[in-house]
Image (cartoon, helix red, strand yellow):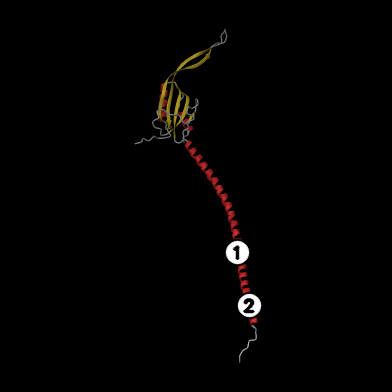
Amino acid sequence: MRELDFLPDWYKEDKRRQAHVRQQYVALLIVFLIMMAFNLVATHRVGRAAAEIAGLESQRLCSEGVVHEFALLTGKLNDLKTRAKLVEQIDSRVDLAAVLAELSHLVADPIVLRQVEIVAEPLGRAGATEPRPGNAVRVAGGTPAGEKDVCLGPVKFRVVLTGVAVLPADVAALVCQLDASPYFHQVRPAFYGNANTPLGTRTAPRGPEGPGAARAEGRVELTEFEIACYVANYQEMNES
């Protein structure tokens, strides 16, 4: 028996077209859902990235503050190092108070010092015929001649004692005491000689003519001296 198809072709074509349209709608719906999911994921990732960027920004600001503070501390540290180096160069590491105390212990009653001069000189100066005053400290007397010439670094102190004594033997004894003291070395008397010094004046007793006039008591002969030495804060090494 032969099967007869009474459906027209346009109807079959319409059914095929509707099925194709449904397939397209399903495909578009799937694409739309995929795009929505991708959009949600991208939005989530963008939000998380924005939060991370905000955290990094706060960390950047904190790091900038730390770097700025570190730069300030580094500048202060360098300044302190420079000052410490300058102080180390200026510091002679010599207790001048102890040196003066030793001088007051060695100088006996028959000796009167007129001036004590302590002059700083740089170490290792070879070929100098005459010591050039450096950073001078005068205990008594005038202004040091080389006050503007400041010695930095290791220095040696030249001590010059000027005064008078009753006898030349007192000057010799002082030189021996200075030479035997552990505080001084290279003790050399610069000069000594006789000096006439007036003892003073007195007033004559009151007489019938009126009060007496002032008369000189007389003069006494003393020994004037100058002794030069160095504070023993260094040791000379002979170069071979």
Expressed as whole percent of the image width and height from the top left, the position of residue 112 reads: 47, 23
- 92 shown above or below 38: above
The residue most toward the bottom is 1
Amino acid type of disc 2? Arg
Expressed as whole percent of the image width and height from the top left, the position of residue 64 reads: 57, 50
The numbered disc on residue 42 is: 1
* Residue designated by label 2: 17
Front residue of this view, candidates 209 and 179: 179
Ranked by sequence position, the earlier of labels 1 and 2 is 2
* Rendering quarter of residue 32: bottom right
- 29 shown above or below 12: above
The residue most toward the top is 209
Front residue of this view, candidates 86 and 190: 86
Asked if the residues shown at circle 1 and circle 2 are in contact, with their CB atoms under 8 angstroms apart, the answer is no
Secondary structure, mark 1, is helix
Front residue of this view, candidates 103 and 205: 103
The residue most toward the front is 9
What residue sits 62% from the left and 74% below the top? 24
Front residue of this view, candidates 1 and 26: 1
- 43 shown above or below 211: below
Marks 1 and 2, how far apart in space?
A: 37 Å
* Rendering quarter of residue 185: top left
* Rendering quarter of residue 196: top left
- 104 shown above or below 39: above
> Callout 1 environment at 10 Å: few (<14), some (14 to 19), or many (20+)?
few
> Callout 2 environment at 10 Å: few (<14), some (14 to 19), or many (20+)?
few
The numbered disc on residue 15 is: none
Expressed as whole percent of the image width and height from the top left, the position of residue 58 reads: 59, 54
Expressed as whole percent of the image width and height from the top left, the position of residue 228 reads: 42, 27
Secondary structure, mark 2, is helix
Amino acid type of disc 1? Ala
